[in-house]
Structures are given as structure tokens and as C-alpha cells.
Amino acid sequence: MTALRLRWQRSVAITATAAAAFLGTAIAATPAQAHSHGWSVDCYTVDLNLTNYSQDKDNTVKITVGDRTVLSETFKGEYNKKLDLPKHTEELKVTADVVAGDDSKFSWNESKTAPVCETESPSPSPTESETTTPAPSASPTTTPSQSEAPQPSASESSSSAPAAKPQGGGENLAETGSSSNTPMLVGIAAAVVIAGGGLVAFARKRRSSQG
């Protein structure tokens, strides 16, 4: 009976010791799990989120971009911050340094790289040789209608048109001086005069013979 009691007491002591050890480990690990941090870096910004830090003592946070410190502040409990990065044409090294006020084992220092932002390249402007001048549209050639034809002036019509021939007289009316028929007319007149003179003389002889 005594042996059983001793064995039972020894088992209880071992169990109690194990429970105490487990409880102590859990208590020691609880503060470590309480401190949490998260941060991210892209080409434009740095996003920092710190939670469950000491509420009684000051905690320090510092952000360095390249060789320049862009943030240095103290906080208690929680800290959330978003920073804009300067414009850059090369990758930037961004470093976050956090010092916990309650225990140095919760402090940390990490570095990340901010990539170069991809911007749309402007479309090249067309060169002078590439610019095309539109060909002038062919103007329709219209044949002037009869009504649009220029009318000749009075002087041009009179000089270009042939002179009208006078009716009845023919070309002889345009001649001046004696006509070609004048000798014929003179001969006929002379014949009439001679015939008249012969008739007068015959009449006189007849009268004289009857008397």
C-alpha cells in the first residue's frame, strides 16, 4: 500500500512539473506573439503596419530610402503609415528599422527594393518625311457650252464677215467714171439724130413737090 502511494505521489509530482513548465513556456511566448509587423514596398509607396507594441514605453520606427531618412517617429501600441517614394529611374533600397521599447528582442531591421515604375512611352511623332501631303483632287474639266462661248465683238464681226454684194447692180455699180456701154448709147443717139434729120428733109421735099 505504501509503495502504491509513493508511486502515485511521484506521478502527480511529474505531471505538476510538466504542467508548470508548459505554462511558463506559454507565458514567455505570449509577448513575442503579441508584437507583429507588416510592411510592403512598390514603385510608388511604402506601406507600414505595426500592431501590439508596448503601450507604456516609446517604440521607434525609421524608414530610409537609399542614403536618406524619410521617416523617424515614436509610437505606442499601433502604428500605420503610408509614404510616397520620390520619382526614380533606378531601383531604390528601402530600409525599415523598428526598435521596441519593452524588449530589444522585438526590434527588427529589414530592407526591400522599390522597382522602377513602368510608364507608357509617348508615341513617336511622325517625322517630316513620313508626313503625307494629300494629293489635290483633279478639278473636272468642263467644256464650255454654246451659251458660255465668248461672243465676237462688233468690230471683229464686221472685219471678218465678207462685204454683202448690192442687189441689181452687180459689181459694175462699184465702178466710177464712164461705163463700158457709153459708146453704144452714143452711137444709138447719133443714129436717131441722123434718122430724124433724114425724116425732116424728106418731109420738106414732099411738101415742096406738092406745092
Image: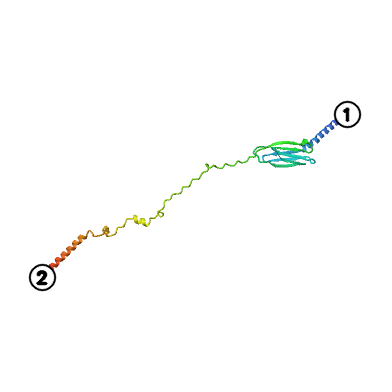
Rendered location of residue 185, percent (x, y)? 20, 61
Rendered location of residue 170, percent (x, y)? 27, 58
Residue 55 lies in what quarter of the image? top right
Name the side, left or right, on which 35 lies relative to 144: right
**Residue lying at 82% horizontally and 34% vertically, measured from the top left:** 24
Q: Which mark is residue 172?
A: none
Residue 6 shows up from this direction: yes
Q: Residue furthest bottom?
A: 211
Q: Secondary structure at mark 2?
A: helix
Tag 1: Cα neighbours inside 10 Å, few (<14), some, or many (≥20)?
A: few
The kind of residue on which mark 2 rests is: Ser
Tell me which numbered mark, 1 or 2, is placed earlier along the sequence.
1
Rendered location of residue 82, percent (x, y)? 71, 42
Rendered location of residue 61, percent (x, y)? 74, 39
The kind of residue on which mark 1 rests is: Leu
Q: Is residue 170 above or below residue 103?
A: below
Q: Which mark is residue 6?
A: 1
Q: Residue furthest right?
A: 2
Quadrant, the C terminus: bottom left
Name the side, left or right, on which 95 lies relative to 182: right
Quadrant, the N terminus: top right
**Residue lying at 12% horizontally and 69% vertically, measured from the top left:** 204
Where is mark 2, residue-wise? Answer: 208
